[in-house]
Image: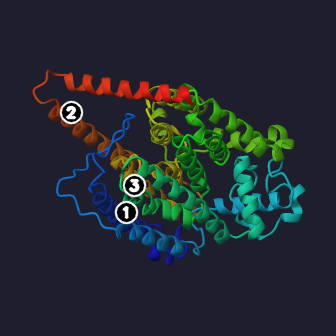
């Protein structure tokens, strides 16, 4: 990470960055393998139908009281190296600062695009750094309030990254508490804290997705602690920072989490109130994004082979996303599992999959370790490979082989995981008739679901 921070413009030196990123990710995977063999980690899988991978506890490494401080210390050092670096892979942070400066001056950022002459008194060097200055902001109200709070301190990328570091501390604490509640070793924090994607995208480029992940994880921890009103407030902050966590709403409705949803509704109204004067302009930028943006999507690539209408493809993907959310609502047996499954589904179905979109899913890996996502969080960096050519020509072309490596690697690992899980079931079944062990597992899962539903009714 220190070497990446010293490269300068990462857009121009993408190949060198990817070599260093690959080395960092290899070290991360080796460390993850060590952590997942610690006593108490058990098989690496989740009960929500998202494939995991078996981590054997045979010849497990001994527990050390020094491991967790080392994990946190090394991760914090990597962040400290990246925070001062200029964000050269993406211009998004400058849009955050632009919006934040408007909010700090009491101006609603939704009615006007940055290039609008109505905002002429703010046109300066910051405007020239913006990408798509002709498009109104797409970021939700809670994100705008975060941008404004950071801009009140300093409208600089480093100040915003330090703000993210503060929010991340709440995420790490919430993850640690949930790990302990499950009897899992705290060292599993490494699966999030050492992930190179999180480091580069959050503390190199300063993407707001980390803030959404922090609010979501805090909400899940409060939900598990039966603090439903606070969980609802945190969930509202997550949704109105990045709309993606709203995919969990069907699961919450099925679990009759009315107190949480009610608190989320009240909080959402309070957060949106300062911006409601924009009227329909609140969603103008968002609709432009939904209609025209695309990047690094294997689903979009495949559907274009059989469908000619771009709008039709986007509608199919949106419908598939809703179906996935309802399937998760029906199948998932825990709040964290539902969140992880929703986030993973989005990565497979969205027309736009920027690397930083993976950050919220990585935040849940300590609880739902998944070697497919561990691998994909490194492979997705390949989407930066065409960046130097884009800088020279202004034309963006993502070769199909990059998509096949990224998503092919993900599905290949998942296939191995499914085969390993089937083998474990056969071993557990012993001489039982074919299908008997599966039926036992289904009965056990039914009992778990029934107990959770009774507990939710009590809540």
Residue drawn at the location 48% of the way across and 74% of the way down? 77
- Residue 82 vs 428, above or below: the answer is below
| First in residue order: circle 3 vs circle 2 | 3
Label 2: state its secondary structure.
Answer: helix
Mark 2 crowd level (few <14, some 14–19, many ≥20, 10 Å Cα): some
Residue 456 horizontal/vertical position (percent): 53, 29
Question: Which structural element holds mark 3?
Answer: helix
Residue labelled with disc 3: 379
Residue that numbered label 1 is attached to: 25
Q: Is residue 388 among the parts visible in the rendering?
A: yes
Q: Which mark is residue 425?
A: 2
Query: How far apart, in angstroms, are the residues tagged by discs 3 and 2?
Result: 30 Å
> In the image, which is nearer the foreground, mark 1 or mark 3?
1
| Residue 360, placed above or below residue 151 | above
Residue farthest toward the left in the current orientation of the protein = 431
Q: Tell which tag, 3 or 2, sits nearer the viewer.
A: 2
Q: CA distance from mark 1 to mark 3?
A: 9 Å
**Marks 1 and 3 close (CB-CB < 8 Å):** no
Where the N terminus falls, by quadrant? bottom left
């Amino acid at each position: 990470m220190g070497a990446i921070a010293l490269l300068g413009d990462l857009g121009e030196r993408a190949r060198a960055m990817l070599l260093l990123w690959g080395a960092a990710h290899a070290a991360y995977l080796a460390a993850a393998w060590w952590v997942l063999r610690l006593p108490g980690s058990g098989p690496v899988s989740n009960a929500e139908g998202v494939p995991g991978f078996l981590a054997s506890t045979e010849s497990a490494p001994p527990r050390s009281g020094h491991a967790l401080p080392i994990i946190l210390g090394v991760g914090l050092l990597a962040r400290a190296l990246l925070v001062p670096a200029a964000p050269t892979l993406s211009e998004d942070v400058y849009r955050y600062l632009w919006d934040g400066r408007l909010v700090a001056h009491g101006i609603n950022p939704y009615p006007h695009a940055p290039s609008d002459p109505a905002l002429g008194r703010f046109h300066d060097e910051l405007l020239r750094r913006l990408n798509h200055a002709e498009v109104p902001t797409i970021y939700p109200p809670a994100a705008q309030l975060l941008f404004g709070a950071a801009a009140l301190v300093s409208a600089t990328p480093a100040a915003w990254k330090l703000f993210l570091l503060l929010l991340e501390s709440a995420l790490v604490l919430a993850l640690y508490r949930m790990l302990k509640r499950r009897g899992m070793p705290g060292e599993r924090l490494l699966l999030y804290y050492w992930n190179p994607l999180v480091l580069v995208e959050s503390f190199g480029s300063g993407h707001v997705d980390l803030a959404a992940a922090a609010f979501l994880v805090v909400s899940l921890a409060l939900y598990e602690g039966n603090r439903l009103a606070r969980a609802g407030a945190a969930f509202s902050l997550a949704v109105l920072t990045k709309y993606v966590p709203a995919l969990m709403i069907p699961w919450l409705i099925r679990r009759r989490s009315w107190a949480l949803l009610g608190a989320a509704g009240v909080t959402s109204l309070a957060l949106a109130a300062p911006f409601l004067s924009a009227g329909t302009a609140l969603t103008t930028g968002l609709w432009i994004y939904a209609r025209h943006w695309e990047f690094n999507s294997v689903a979009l690539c495949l559907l274009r082979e059989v469908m000619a209408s771009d709008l039709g493809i986007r509608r199919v993907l949106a419908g598939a996303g809703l179906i996935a959310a309802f399937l998760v609502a029906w199948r998932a047996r825990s709040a964290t599992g539902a969140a992880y499954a929703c986030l993973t589904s989005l990565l497979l179905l969205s027309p736009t999959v920027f690397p930083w979109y993976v950050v919220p899913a990585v935040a849940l890996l300590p609880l739902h370790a998944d070697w497919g996502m561990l691998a994909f969080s490194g492979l997705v960096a390949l989407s930066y490979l065409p960046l130097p050519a884009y800088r020279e020509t202004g034309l963006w072309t993502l070769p199909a082989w990059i998509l096949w490596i990224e998503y092919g690697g993900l599905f290949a690992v998942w296939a191995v995981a499914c085969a390993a899980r089937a083998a474990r079931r056969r071993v557990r079944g012993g001489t039982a008739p074919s299908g008997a062990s599966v039926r036992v597992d289904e009965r056990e899962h039914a009992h778990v679901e029934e107990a959770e539903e009774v507990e939710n009714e009590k809540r």
